[in-house]
Amino acid sequence: MQMPTVYKPKNHIRIVTAASLFDGHDAAINVMRRIIQSSGAEVIHLGHNRSVHEIVNAAIQEDVQAIAITSYQGGHMEFFRYMYDMLKENGCEHIKIFGGGGGVILPDEMEELHNYGITRIYSPDDGMSMGLQGMINDLLEKSDFPTGKDISVKIDDILNKDKVAIARLISAAENYPDGVKELLDKLTAIGKKKKSPVLGITGTGGAGKSSLVDEIVRRFLNDFPDKTIAIISVDPSKRKSGGALLGDRIRMNAIDNPQVYMRSLATRQSNLSISRYVKDAEMIAHAAGFDLVILETSGIGQSDTAIVDHSDVSMYVMTPDYGAATQLEKIDMLDFADIVAVNKFDKRGALDALRDVRKQYQRNNGLFDKDPDDMPVYGTVASQFNDPGVNEFYERLLEILNEKTGAGFVPGKTLSVQTPEKIYIIPPQRVRYLSEISETVRGYNKWAEEQSKVAGRLYNISRTMEELKAGGKEKETVALKELYDEIVRELDPNNLHLLKAWDEKKKRYAADKFTFKVRGREFTVDTYAETLAHLKIPKVSLPKYESWGEILKWLLKENVPGEFPFAAGVFPFKREGEDPTRMFAGEGGPERTNRRFHYVSLGMPAKRLSTAFDSVTLYGQDPDRRPDIYGKIGNSGVSISCLDDAKKLYSGFHLADPKTSVSMTINGPAPTMVGYFMNAAVDQQCELYIKEHGLEKEVEKKIEEIYRKKGTERPRYQGKLPKGNDGLGLMLLGVTGDMVLPKDVYEKIKIDTLTKVRGTVQADILKEDQAQNTCIFSTDFSLKLMGDIQEYFIKHKVRNFYSVSISGYHIAEAGANPISQVAFTLSNGFTYVEYY
């Protein structure tokens, strides 16, 4: 196959890539940024769910030629126009904007965006006609212009920390140093007088340097909100293509702050961990008067110590996975580092690694008069929130900075300091739970096959004996009877019972009625469904096997619904009293979706509402007039931001009725949404209680008094109530039942309602972490919330509303094949069971 021609840039092209705000679909942008990088460009990748402000801020500080964005969640018109306007406001309209969104962005919308000033929105047709490389070639060609050439930057711009000027001057120092030599010389003289402390951070690739930098920056800004930080981050250039992935920003959550400036540099040469232009960038930061300069190198080998020559305090980051203890003797940085972090300290053997690194540091630096525990070597887990190890490391780092530079960084807060301890999702002694399941299933299947063969042999012997008896040869059956009795001992007694009960089972399913029990309640159902042609179709059809081996294999591996191994379902028959139709809706505000719900459910005996939420809600954010948020409100789902919204959304539906069921497709903020739903249901029952006891006027006075004191208007349902909506749930808008009813009455209503509500919430956070990316908390914390909700459900007997719905669809959507989709989905389900 002929490879497409790759465009060769004339200039060093730098591009910011990201997925738009409230958009977790990052598969496309990951493919695109890899092709951009392999084509020779330097890519500053921000990841998914990035606001216009974050993207533009990064583009300005990095002085890029272009921004490339994917937008698959709607709101693209407002998003791209807002980005263009913000670049223009900052005097950076030269930065090109490229985008794509598959079929989400319509052709007429593309044309409108092009007319507005967006350089190019690529369509699926472009992909077919140009190919992926062709689209990237077009993007690079349009972005191939110099940066840093003939710039008009004044010394005062730098002294005032003008981030546009700083970014352009660093580009000039990289690309056209002769043109700014005089300005750099003047700034160098100023910088030497001001000289801010420089923290140099180096370490092996993948040690978590960027995550640790982010944790240090977050703590520093909390302690010193008036201080400023400049971060210079270096990543390696590819020798073959010249491209580079400058990916440190994706780990930085604390840098979107006016007190922070960050610039990513590519080495632009192979086998080096530091760019030759770092010295100029550092001096510009000194001249600008940043209070702290952080220099982070790319991943290094055992002998690299270049960071020492560029920093006042050098910090080495490693992991417990360094190999044999003798490997520590080869790490040159243990001779020079002022402080060492053994990051990813939650790994097995980390305590032993910490002891060995401390002893090696002691030997290398000749500190035999001190205890190894006093060495500046600390165990850290940068991925863990408020990690005690990072806290201790940070406090010691400030002390060393003060000792070596006189910086005077005195923290104002006391942080929790102790040996970091991993918070396990699954305890270490149970980490083989998936292996145990697969081993058990394989073992069971093997046993089922063996037992089936035994049953088959018994059947064959039995049939032979019957034939011999029918032919008058009973004497020949004696030996066969002995063999039968010997083999039958190999058959499990339970399996023998299954075979003996087979004929009775067939009779039960052949009868017109079938009776079974669920949760102590007895149900009788028809075993047949009658067609329009008056044909009786069995709801459960049993196989017509004769051989005991085949019968037993079917019973052990499939069986009827409601019996082990539950391959056909956990209940003997499906519930007849509930219409299986799901009424799916989600658009605009709560009133609009409520009208849609009533329209699709009008006249239906059962109300089975399936709710889709907009991307703003899915990410747990409030709606706002800011354009990159505003365009996504109520787009592809309903916008819900408070309890009153939930009350309006489900108004007119009796949420405690056994024929009402509500499904909510939401994950990250699921605990909050479950809280909204439960409170809406409880307040509906409070409203019914108020009406039954004639308390309307009394309650109305209480509500009026509450809002008179607040001095605000009461919330209302916007517009007319749709047909079928009797207004249930709207009486207590703006208040809750416990504010207008006696405590004992409210508690009784609440307890009763929780046992009656029916429905489910998706809340599958593992799937989100793997595929959909609508995570707003860490996976550990989200799982803890899920466990807390399930515990609450158990305590309050919430048995008909399910706290999690395990989904595999989004895993396939993210690119998994059917086999890996099933594997991930099953493993997620088993993980929840193990965790609970």
Image (cartoon, rainbow, N blue to C red):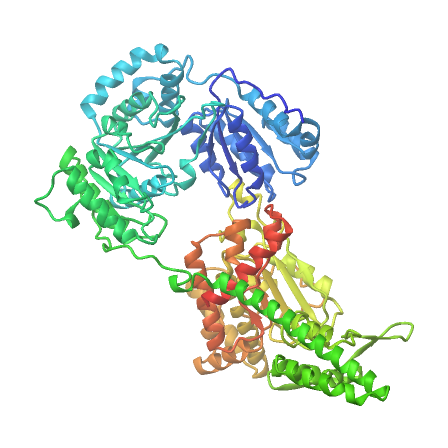
- Residue 285 in which image quadrant: top left
Which of the pair 237/714 is nearer the observer?
Answer: 237
Number of callouts: 0
Which of the pair 232/620 is nearer the observer?
Answer: 232
Give left or right: position of 723 versus 318: right
Q: Position of residue 350 (x, y in %)?
A: 29, 51
Residue 642 seen in render: yes
- Residue 180 in which image quadrant: top left
Tell me which residue sits at (28%, 24%) in the image.
159
Q: Position of residue 329 (x, y in %)?
A: 23, 38
* Residue located farthest toward the right when viewing the structure as drawn: 533
Q: Position of residue 248 (x, y in %)?
A: 40, 36
Tell me which residue sits at (61%, 27%) in the image.
133
Residue 810 seen in render: no
Which of the pair 361/6 is nearer the observer?
Answer: 361
Give left or right: position of 87 versus 373: right
Residue 674 drawn above or below residue 615: below
Give left or right: position of 75 versus 603: left
Tell me which residue sits at (57%, 54%) in the image.
639
Q: Position of residue 608 (x, y in %)?
A: 67, 67
Q: Quadrant of the N terminus?
A: top right
Residue 494 drawn above or below residue 666: below
